[in-house]
């Protein structure tokens, strides 16, 4: 089974920023990574491409394909469950990282920023924290600028035999 971990935290805590800085280290280590982002407040498609325009015109599915990349826009009458999305993407990757999905029963790395809140959220399955302050506790804790250390922690926790 492909390992899964979720980066969780309050709105604007720095989850996306952290991931954009950790993913290059995972890639250099040979880890083929898929990211599933939970957009709790909806998605904003701003008509920047033909694909966006086609989707915004009302198409139920737009599959945009080009050499080396594809995008899929799909309408649902419900929000897809993490388990469903995971089953669709996981077979082709070494690791699946989620952003969000606080309530999912998966291991979580909590991201904290002092200007947002210094109080950790009351969540199950938190295995580490990343913060811009000393948050103490028994869990492994990293500073927001320790991107490589966070990547190494993820690898050692989920794929130690294959990478690094």
Image: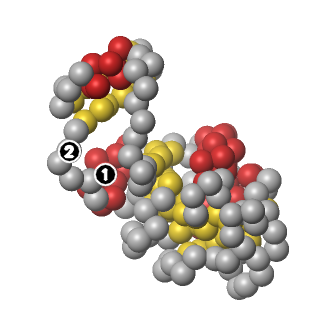
Looking at the image, how many numbered discs can be counted on the residues? Answer: 2
Residue at the farthest bottom position = 138
Residue 17 vertical position relative to residue 152 in the rendered view, above or below: above
Task: Return the residue nearer the eye: 119 or 2.
Answer: 119
- Mark 1 against mark 2, which lies toward the viewer? 2
**Label 1 residue SS:** helix
How far across and how far down the image is residue 33, in percent? 51, 45
Closer to the N terminus: mark 1 or mark 2?
A: 2
Q: Which residue is mark 2?
A: 76
Residue 34 vertical position relative to residue 108 in the rendered view, above or below: above
Color style of the picture: secondary structure
Name which residue lies at 56% across and 46% down. 31
Residue 6 vertical position relative to residue 41 in the rendered view, above or below: below
How far across and how far down the image is residue 88, in percent? 28, 47
Q: Are marks 1 and 2 in contact (CB under 8 Å)?
A: no
In the picture, measured across the screen, residue 162 lies left or right of residue 113, that is left
Question: Which numbered dot is residue 149?
Answer: none
How far across and how far down the image is residue 110, in percent? 61, 68
Q: Which residue is mark 1?
A: 85
Q: Quadrant of the N terminus?
A: bottom left
Name which residue lies at 62% across and 54% down. 12
User: Distance between the Cα atoms at labels 1 and 2?
Assistant: 13 Å
């Amino acid at each position: 089974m492909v390992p899964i971990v979720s980066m969780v935290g309050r709105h604007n805590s720095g989850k996306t920023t952290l991931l954009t800085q950790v993913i290059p280290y995972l890639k250099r280590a040979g880890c083929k990574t898929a990211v599933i982002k939970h957009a709790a407040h909806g998605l904003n498609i701003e008509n920047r491409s033909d694909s966006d325009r086609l989707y915004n015109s009302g198409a139920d599915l737009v599959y945009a394909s080009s050499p080396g990349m594809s995008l899929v826009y799909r309408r649902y009458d419900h929000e897809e469950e993490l388990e469903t999305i995971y089953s669709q993407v996981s077979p082709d990757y070494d690791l699946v990282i989620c952003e969000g999905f606080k309530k999912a029963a998966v291991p979580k790395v909590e991201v904290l920023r002092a200007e947002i809140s210094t109080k950790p959220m009351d969540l199950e399955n938190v295995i580490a924290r990343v913060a811009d302050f000393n948050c103490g506790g028994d869990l492994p804790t990293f500073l927001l600028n320790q991107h490589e250390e966070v990547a190494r922690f993820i690898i050692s926790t989920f794929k130690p035999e294959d990478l690094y």
